[in-house]
Every structure is written in structure tokens, then in C-alpha cells.
Image (cartoon, grey):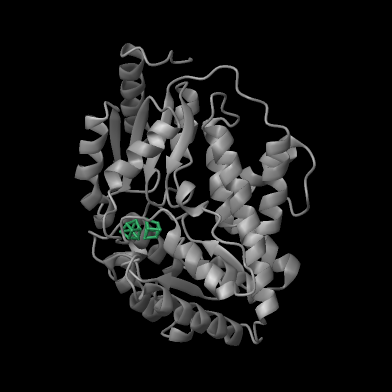
């Protein structure tokens, strides 16, 4: 497992790939190497800056099993596979390397899971569970004041958890480092959606998912090396945008590459939505965190008067000159299901073909997925948008 800075493109891509494809292994080795705690998170609305300032590594829980046995007696079968898989993994000791988990009040599923987690994964000790109360209505007049107080509470609580007092200077450094990493990711995504993409679909996946586990400085150095030596792809097929929520599905980009498609942009909470840099820390890092969370492209679990999810996805697709859009959704994910009709209607009105992929387990059925992707890409090719490379 790579742990130091990399100076050439293949090594940088390998650093990103190994972190993206085996995130728990990376986190375990980081913990062993540094002797510092690892805190699990479920949502990109949890402020990573607070975790880093407390000396811990934020670890986004996404790589969950497709078997939910240990979760079934504790969580209804109509919860999304992220919640069920994580509970199964946690209940069977697969997340024992974590020193705690931070929930965010996003969807109903997550709001209920924290108590179930506390009783079943932490041996009934609520001290191992933290809940970050991110405002639901991000445009409300009271949202900013509320969020400032909540971030301050979280910072103090995490400091107490790891036995330290988090100094404002440490929080400022964490805000600056995370912002630099987001700027690096945003720059890479900007280049990728240009006329000559620089990442294959698996590399695009690895570059966004590695952001969910690598410390910001390590992430920045790897993506900067990739950006410094961009190497545009010379053969590209239909230009695809993937939109949805959390996506731990290495098989999807692998299949896109196999079928000759080019993944040029996303509207995912593991990619574009988490890449908005936010303001510089200035002399008030708490305000910088709050303003970044409130102004980033929002997910369906948040509300803002006038926000139109259909228009947002169409704009992403147009910016990237996309030929088609894949809408990726975990089964029983209500927030994304509620947005689907408006997004589909807007894509149809804009003349943008789309494919809904709803998966019951994180990876889904590979054979079925390949068949559906192949049919979609052939339909795009028949429409004359681009030639599918095989
Ligand atoms: S879709 Fe929204 S609520 Fe769900 S994990 Fe992503 S940011 Fe959080
Ligand atoms: S937003 Fe959807 S995918 Fe995320 S935890 Fe809630 S139900 Fe699951």
C-alpha cells in the first residue's frame, strides 16, 4: 500500500486506484503507520475538516457487502443497501478498525441507523457514535447560524473523543488542506469534461473515490501529478455522465471501459458535488466550512427554494457535451427516487437519452448490467452520436 508522495503518472494513478479499490486496507495501514484514530462517515455533508483537525482520518463507509445477513434482524429489508450492508459489516466486526462513526441527519434511513448502530455495533455505547445535524433546508435564513454552532459543537466533541483540544490554527490548516484537495479534484473533473478526456472510466472512478479515504495532502499530490501529465485519450466512445448518490460500484466504470464508452462527468456525492472548493479559510475556519457546505451543489436529501434537480443534471450533461446520462440509484433510496421523475422529464425535454440503473446490492448483477449498458451504448451509436470503440 502506497504511503508516500508519487512523482510519475502511473504511480500516482496506482496510489489512487489502491485507495479507491481497497479503502479499508488503506485506512488500516494508515492507522498502523500513524497511530492515530480513524472515524467512519456515511455522507459527504459530514465536515471532513473537523475530523482531520482532531488528528483523525475520515473514512467514508461505502465498500459494503452484498449479503446483509447480520443486518436483517435489525433493519427492515426496504432500507438501501448502503445502510444494510454497512450494518452487516459493522455487526460482524468488519469495521473494527474504526474508532467511531459520524452520522449526518440526511435521509430517514440514516437518521434511524445511528441508534441501531449504537445498540448493535458499539456494544450499546453511544459514545462511539456522533451525529452531525446538517440543516435540511440549506437556503433557510437560520441555516447558517445553526450550522456554525453545530460545527463548533462537532469540533469540540471530536477533540474530546481523541483526548485533545482542537486549536483554531489546526482547524484552519485542515480547511486549507481539504480545500486544496477539492480544487485539485475540481480541476481534474474540468479537464476530463473537455474535448479530450484524460482518464479512462476506471481511472475516473478511482480518482473520485480515493478522495473518500486518502488524507487531503496525499490526495492533492497524486492528482496534481496526473494533471501535470494529462495524456489525452485518443480513442473515445459515447460521452457519458453518471448522476446519482453514493456510488461504490467499481464494476460500472470497468464495464464502461470494456464497452468503449467515455465517462466525462458526474453529478454524484462522491464526485462533482463533493468537489466544490468552498471559500478559503480566512480568519474564520468554522464560517468557511459552513459556507462551503451550504453553497455546494446540493443532493436530493437537502432542500433549497427554487432548486430544480432536472435542470441541474441537464446543465452538467450540457457542460460536458454528453451523449447520454446514466442515472445510478440504490434501491429503496427515497431521496433519489423522489427526484427521478423530474430529472427524467428534463432529460427527455433536452433530448438527452438516459438509462436508469437501480441496484439492490452495491455492485448489482454484472451480467444484467453489461447487457443493459451495451444496449444503451448501441442505441447512442445508432443515433449517430459517437462511434462505440470495441
Ligand atoms: S446522496 Fe446526499 S445524503 Fe446520501 S450520502 Fe450523498 S450527500 Fe449524503
Ligand atoms: S440518501 Fe439514499 S443511498 Fe444515501 S443513505 Fe439515504 S437512502 Fe441510502
**Image quadrant where residue 125 sits:** bottom left
Image quarter for ligand 1: bottom left
Closer to the camera in the image, 337 or 276 = 276
Residue visible at 42% across and 30% down in the picture = 240
Q: Position of residue 211 (x, y in %)?
A: 58, 53
Picture layout, residue 276 above or below residue 114 = above
Picture layout, residue 306 above or below residue 162 = above
Residue visible at 47% across and 36% down in the picture = 265
Residue visible at 54% across and 24% down in the picture = 195
Please state the total of marks drawn on the protein image.
Answer: 0
Closer to the camera in the image, 226 or 18 = 226
Closer to the camera in the image, 385 or 67 = 385
Q: Position of residue 222 (x, y in %)?
A: 70, 46
Q: Position of residue 332 (x, y in %)?
A: 25, 54
Picture layout, residue 163 above or below residue 34 = below
**Residue 62 visible:** yes
Q: Position of residue 173 (x, y in %)?
A: 69, 69
Closer to the camera in the image, 338 or 303 = 303
Left or right of 218 on screen, residue 303: left
Picture layout, residue 382 above or below residue 59 = above
Left or right of 207 on screen, residue 30: right
**Residue 1 visible:** no
Amino acid at each position: 500500500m502506497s504511503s508516500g508522495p508519487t512523482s510519475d503518472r502511473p504511480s500516482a494513478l496506482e496510489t489512487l486506484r489502491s485507495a479507491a479499490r481497497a479503502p479499508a486496507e488503506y485506512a488500516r495501514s494508515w492507522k498502523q503507520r500513524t497511530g492515530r484514530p480513524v472515524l467512519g462517515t456515511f455522507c459527504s455533508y459530514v465536515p471532513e475538516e473537523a475530523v482531520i483537525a482532531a488528528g483523525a482520518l475520515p473514512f467514508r463507509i461505502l465498500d459494503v457487502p452484498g449479503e446483509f445477513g447480520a443486518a436483517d434482524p435489525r433493519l427492515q429489508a426496504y432500507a438501501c443497501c448502503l445502510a444494510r450492508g454497512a450494518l452487516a459489516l459493522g455487526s460482524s466486526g468488519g469495521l473494527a478498525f474504526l474508532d467511531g462513526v459520524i452520522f449526518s441527519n440526511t435521509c430517514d434511513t440514516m437518521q434511524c441507523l445511528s441508534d441501531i448502530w449504537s445498540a448493535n455495533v458499539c456494544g450499546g455505547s453511544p459514545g462511539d457514535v456522533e451525529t452531525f445535524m446538517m440543516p435540511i433546508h440549506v437556503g433557510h435564513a437560520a441555516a447558517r447560524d445553526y450550522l456554525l454552532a453545530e460545527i463548533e459543537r462537532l469540533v469540540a466533541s471530536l477533540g474530546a473523543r481523541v483526548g485533545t483540544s482542537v486549536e483554531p490554527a489546526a482547524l484552519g490548516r485542515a480547511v486549507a488542506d481539504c480545500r486544496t484537495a477539492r480544487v485539485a479534484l475540481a480541476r481534474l473533473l474540468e479537464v476530463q469534461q473537455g474535448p479530450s478526456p484524460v482518464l479512462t472510466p476506471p481511472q475516473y472512478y478511482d480518482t473520485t473515490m480515493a478522495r473518500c479515504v486518502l488524507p487531503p495532502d496525499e490526495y492533492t499530490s497524486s492528482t496534481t501529478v496526473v494533471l501535470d501529465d494529462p495524456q489525452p485519450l485518443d480513442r473515445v466512445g459515447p460521452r457519458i455522465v453518471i448522476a446519482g448518490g453514493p456510488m461504490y460500484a467499481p464494476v460500472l466504470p470497468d464495464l464502461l471501459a470494456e464497452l468503449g464508452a467515455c465517462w466525462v462527468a458526474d453529478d454524484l456525492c462522491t464526485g462533482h458535488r463533493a468537489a466544490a472548493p468552498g471559500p478559503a479559510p480566512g480568519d474564520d475556519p468554522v464560517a468557511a466550512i459552513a459556507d462551503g457546505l451550504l453553497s455546494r451543489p446540493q443532493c436530493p436529501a437537502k432542500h433549497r427554494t427554487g432548486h430544480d434537480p432536472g435542470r441541474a443534471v441537464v446543465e452538467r450533461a450540457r457542460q460536458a457535451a454528453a451523449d447520454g446520462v446514466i442515472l445510478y440509484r440504490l434501491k429503496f433510496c427515497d431521496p433519489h427516487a423522489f427526484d427521478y421523475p423530474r430529472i427524467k422529464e428534463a432529460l427527455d425535454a433536452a433530448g438527452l437519452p438516459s438509462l436508469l440503473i437501480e441496484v439492490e446490492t452495491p455492485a448489482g448483477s454484472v451480467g444484467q448490467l453489461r447487457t443493459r449498458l451495451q444496449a444503451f451504448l448501441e442505441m447512442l451509436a445508432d443515433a449517430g452520436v459517437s462511434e462505440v470503440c470495441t
